[in-house]
Structures are given as structure tokens and as C-alpha cells.
Image (spheres, helix red, strand yellow):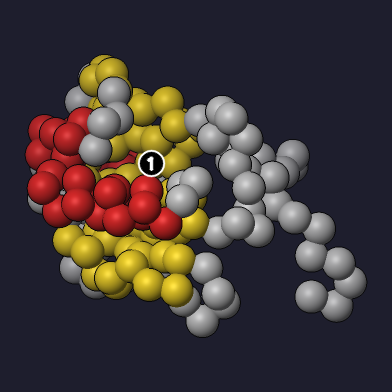
Amino acid sequence: MEQRVTLITLGVSDLARSKAFYEALGWRGQEVAETVFFQAGGLGLVLWGREKLARDCGLEPGPAAGFGGIALAHNVRSEAEVDELLAVVEQAGGTVTKPAAVNEIGFYSSAFVDPDGHAWEVAHNPGFPLAEDGTVTLPDFGPGQ
């Protein structure tokens, strides 16, 4: 298997509400067959009905509440961008779950959840510089890190 992620699909309870939330953050997507596709840098973020996604994965839909064990991350180029994005998130109907601050590792970060409780980290980490197109290249952490 090649080391690559091509799509991240979020199971949502209300497709229209979720599409509106991400559009309020400035994302532009395409809705096709009750599925919304957003180009997110070099991968796609997909919104699809939670029950349909569970069935497609051969699983029974479970409760939507609580932490699902995954967090998406959106790195930005400055601390001010973290603060600006959090304001937009709240206006769009998201919930800030961790106010922006310098974290224990030493970079400025925060977290929010979208209307379905999908967790996002927003961070300015100078150790993970962003290219002009927004892609990140992980640093060489060296041996023993």
C-alpha cells in the first residue's frame, strides 16, 4: 500500500446543515447523489449521511455523540489566523472546544467541533511550514524522537 490518504469522509446527520457549515468557513464543494465533495489541497473531504457511510463500511451505525477517536488538523501561517478562523467557526455554528493558546509542545493551537461533533485542531506550528499551496512537509524528526 502506498503511503497516501486520498479522501476523508465524515458521516453527518444532516447533509444540508453540514454543507452550509463548511461553506460558511469559505469552502466550496459539489453535491452529487446526496454526497458533498470538497477539494482540500491534495485530498478530498467528503460529507455523506452517517448511516449510509456506516453501511458502506459494513458497519452498523452507532451513536453520534462523543469523541470518535480522530481529529482533523488545519494548520495556518500565523497565530492571528488561528484566532480569525475560530471566530468564523463560531459564526458558522461550530463549537470551540479548546480556546487558542500556546500548547504544551510550544505552538499556538485550538480545537473545535463541527455540527456533527467532528473534531478539528487549528494550529500555527512554525515547525510544520506550509508551502504556498498550503501543503505541509513533515520535518525530519531525527533518530530517537
Q: Residue 125 location, x and y as percent? A: 55, 59
Whether 35 is drawn above or below 127: the answer is above
Task: Name the one closer to the observer, 113 or 128.
Answer: 128
Q: Mark 1 Cα within 10 Å, few/some/many (few <14, many 20+)? A: some
Whether 92 is drawn above or below 112: the answer is above
Reading the image, the residue beneath label 1 is 9
**Residue 93 visible in this rendered orientation of the protein:** yes
Q: Quadrant of residue 62?
A: bottom left
Outermost residue, bottom side: 104
**Residue 64 visible in this rendered orientation of the protein:** no
Tell me the kind of residue under disc 1. Answer: Thr
Residue at the spot 65% in from the left edge and 58% down from the top edge: 127
The number of callouts visible is 1
Task: Name the one closer to the observer, 51 or 128.
Answer: 128
Residue at the spot 38% in from the left edge and 41% down from the top edge: 9
Q: Residue 25 location, x and y as percent? A: 24, 38
Q: Residue 111 location, x and y as percent? A: 33, 64
Q: Residue 39 location, x and y as percent? A: 42, 26
Question: Along the horizontal axis of the image, is 6 left or right of 34?
Answer: right
Question: Along the horizontal axis of the image, is 57 left or right of 15?
Answer: right
Question: Along the horizontal axis of the image, is 99 left or right of 70?
Answer: left
Whether 60 is drawn above or below 100: the answer is above
Residue at the spot 17% in from the left edge and 61% down from the top edge: 95
Residue at the spot 48% in from the left edge and 36% down from the top edge: 7
Q: Check disc 1 and report its element: helix, strand or loop.
A: strand
Outermost residue, right side: 143
Q: Quadrant of the C terminus?
A: bottom right
Q: Quadrant of the N terminus?
A: top right
Whether 66 is drawn above or below 135: the answer is below
